Amino acid sequence: MHELVSVIIPTFNRAALLPEALDSIFRQEWPAIQVIVVDDGSTDHTGELIASYGSKVEYAWQPNQGAGAARNRGLEMVRGSVIAFLDSDDLWLPQKLRVEMALLDQVPEAGAVFSDSEHWLNGKLVLPSRFTNAGVRSASGGPGYLLHDPPLWVHSSLVSTCCMTIRRSALQRLTLPRFDDSRTVNEDWDLEVRLYYSCEIVICPQVLAIIRRIEDNTRIGRAIPGMPMTVEQRRTRVGRHRNVLLRALELPELPASAVEHVHAKLKEVTAVLESL
């Protein structure tokens, strides 16, 4: 019997892109899927669009509060034993859930599986492998446990949110809120770090998702990967990086070896921030 996978899509004014994201879920080579769309205060025709899917999609609307709050709302609706996420501008490859669920079946003690992604900017491939770019690997170089020494996450987020497939039991071990809804960005990076020190994570080095960045005015004030940053955008990004590091230092599970790396990176990031 196939485990039910609950997929949460937060969206804001993405009615033009959302059908492609949904279609990539419906094409999955996995038969048991609950699809949840949380509309974070859209002013376009997102509601009418979702209504056209009938019972295939469960829908919730909330005033605009950010992706973290939208994902938390979706978590209140899940029925599956496994939870996955997809942003409304991104796409899954058809084999994604089948491959990831096979890994979870092979390693039942793992709390999550993280897979690789490629990144596109305005229709052009700018990053063929996020894992290669971040130095993510297992001891064997193939599927296996993520290596934590050194903690690569202090430099950047290692995985795209749509490539996190997590056992519900592992998420429930995290403190509330699961996604820090006081943040408008990097709430997924924060969750990622907390997962590293609360459960075992298996990585799948196969590219299973396509991350698309399209200049559609829904990321106002945020830098677009592959595009030059303004000084203000750089200051914002470095400041948010600093906040992730500070939050990580609050984790009681953070080992001393990781604390040393966090402090070193924090010193470096703070210096950059003060120079801007």
Image: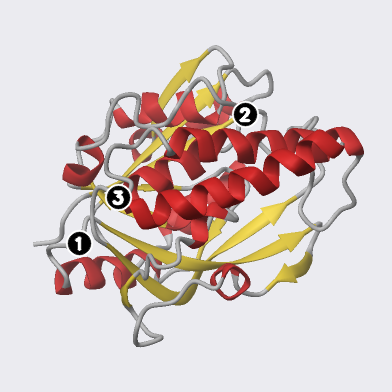
Q: Residue furthest left?
A: 1
Sequence-earlier tag: 2 or 3: 2
Residue at image point 55% right, 25% down? 183
- Residue 25 image point, x, y percent: 43, 55
- Tag nearer the camera, 2 or 1: 1
Pointer 2 residue: 12
Q: Secondary structure at mark 3?
A: loop
How many C-alpha atoms fall within 10 Å of the one at disc 1: few (<14), some, or many (≥20)?
A: some
Image quarter where the C terminus lies is top right
Residue 110 marker: 1
Q: Is residue 51 visible?
A: no
Along the line of sight, the residue nearer the viewer: 7 or 205: 205
* Residue 75, quarter of picture: top left
Residue drawn at (54%, 30%), measured in percent from left and top? 67
Which residue corresponds to mark 3? 197
Q: Does dot 1 land on a helix, a strand or a loop? A: loop
Tell me how far mark 1 sits from mark 3, CA to CA. Answer: 12 Å
Asked if residue 8 can be seen in this view, the reply is yes
User: Which of 164/95 is in front?
Assistant: 164
- Distance of label 2 from label 3 (alpha carbons): 31 Å
**Label 2–label 1 contact, CB within 8 A:** no
Tell which tag, 1 or 3, sits nearer the viewer: 3
Where does residue 23 sit, x and y in percent of width and height? Answer: 50, 54
Relative image position of residue 159 (x, y in whole percent): 50, 58
Q: Position of residue 138 (x, y in %)?
A: 37, 78
Whether 156 is drawn above or below 202: the answer is above
- Tell me which amino acid carries mark 1: Ala
For residue 272, above or below residue 59: below
Q: Amino acid at mark 2?
A: Phe
